[in-house]
Image (cartoon, rainbow, N blue to C red):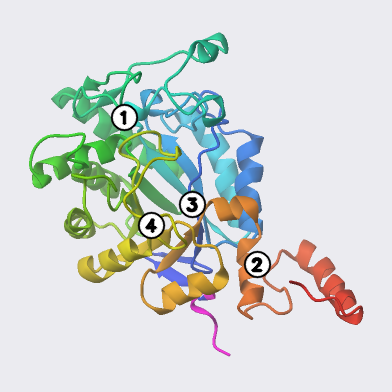
Amino acid sequence: MSEPLLFQPIELRGVAARNRIVVSPMCQYSARDGHVTDWHLVHLGKFAQGGAGIVFVEATAVEARGRITHGDTGIWDDAHVPGLARIAAFVKSQGALPAIQIAHAGRKASMARPWYGNGPLTDADLARGEKPWDTVAPTAQSLGDGWLKPRPLGDDDHWTLLAAYRAATRRAQAAGFELLEIHAAHGYLLHTFLSPLSNRGTREERMRFPLEVVRTVREAWPAQKPLFVRLSSIDDVEGGWSLDDTVAFAKELKALGVDVLDCSSGGILGSATAATKTLVPRVPGFQLPFAERVRKEAGVKTMAVGLILSAQQAEEALAAGRADLIAVGREALYDPNWPHHAAQALGADPQMERWPVQYGWWLTRRESLLRKLGIRRP
């Protein structure tokens, strides 16, 4: 049997991932003043042990005012580098590529952690010592009733932000990351520049600053290392950013040297993790059509994400040319060994040779015993 596509290596510029499985950036809201902790090391390390090809550190703020919550990881200070470097080194030691997503929350900054309400900071948050801070956005339009009103960004702010993205990029390189992703989705700062629901002007005018950020980051990031951009392919609300817009933007991003587009959706209204009314039903693989169309019409590699649950589903998407990479997020939280289990399901690792040797040695003996007992896995 030929190797399943899901487990064929992929080369991106000067780096190669051992397979096509990516663990998405997933905020843990558990940092301290932007610093990662042992929680992040174990959280991300187990995905590398679990067999993923690429493991992303969560949305990491390029400015302190760009955090979503007080618990967000940061990369706005050189002091953040050692903790991040520890994670990158461990992920790499397990055979995965360490990656990081850099972000700015814009008008969605200064909010409560999800388990404390996932909305504007309340008196209870203040009692915990979590005070609000000023937010910024393309316009003074707030996210909604009760949310902080952002200060519109001026020309001087744009230069400050470009410098912050440039410095964050250089810190990511210093920390040892092999891939970098710019977060331009889910209602955060760069997405609010793009969407007609949160910014004014023509599409070209709305794309201008996000493209300048990408240009700045690409110039600061080593030429041999790949750059990803996460997009909300559609706003998923009437009158919002469309898939046609995304294809046009994707062509511009490709021209600037972006290697992979991470095709997500939604988030322009309400918190990124809240359940909101959508136009596109949430069914398994519901965002695959976005990755497929961008890949075909913009001629750029794409990463598919969103309710990709099984190895067969992932393999079929790759075989049909719908994406180049498959990202799993909450499914990886449920099963950190999802890649290893996928390899077994697709017949790519019958002897458990892809597992860490410390695990595989035990598990092969267990499998032998189960077979003798006539016990089959479901």
- Give how far apart the Cα atoms at labels 2 and 3 are: 17 Å
Q: Residue at x 36, y 60 (%)?
A: 224
| Place of residue 216 in the rendered image (x, y in percent of width and height, measured from the top left) | 24, 43
Look at mark 3 in the image and give the residue it sits on: 24
> The residue tagged with tag 4: helix, strand or loop?
loop
Pair 4/2: label in front: 2
Determine the image quadrant of residue 167: top left
Which of the marked residues, 2 or 3, is nearer the chain's N terminus?
3
Look at mark 1 in the image and give the residue it sits on: 106
Q: In the image, which disc is placed on residue 340? A: 2
| Place of residue 54 in the rendered image (x, y in percent of width and height, measured from the top left) | 51, 58
**Three-letter code for the amino acid on which mark 3 is drawn:** Ser
Q: Nearer the viewer, residue 167 or 62?
A: 62
**Three-letter code for the amino acid on which mark 2 is drawn:** His
| Place of residue 329 in the rendered image (x, y in percent of width and height, measured from the top left) | 52, 52
Which of the marked residues, 4 or 3, is nearer the chain's N terminus?
3
Instruction: Check residue 3 for magenta coloring.
Output: yes
Q: In the image, which disc is placed on residue 332? A: none
**Disc 4 crowd, CA 10 A, few/some/many (<14, 14-19, 20+):** some
> The residue tagged with tag 3: helix, strand or loop?
loop
- Give how far apart the Cα atoms at labels 1 and 4 are: 27 Å
**Figure quadrant of the N terminus:** bottom right
Mark 2 in CB contact with mark 1 (< 8 angstroms): no
Mark 4 in CB contact with mark 2 (< 8 angstroms): no
Which of the marked residues, 2 or 1, is nearer the chain's N terminus?
1
Pair 4/3: label in front: 3
Which of the marked residues, 4 or 2, is nearer the chain's N terminus?
4
Residue 93 in view (yes/no): no
Q: Residue at x 44, y 25 (%)?
A: 119
Q: In the image, which disc is placed on residue 225? A: 4
Magenta span? 1-7
Q: Is residue 125 above or below residue 364?
A: above
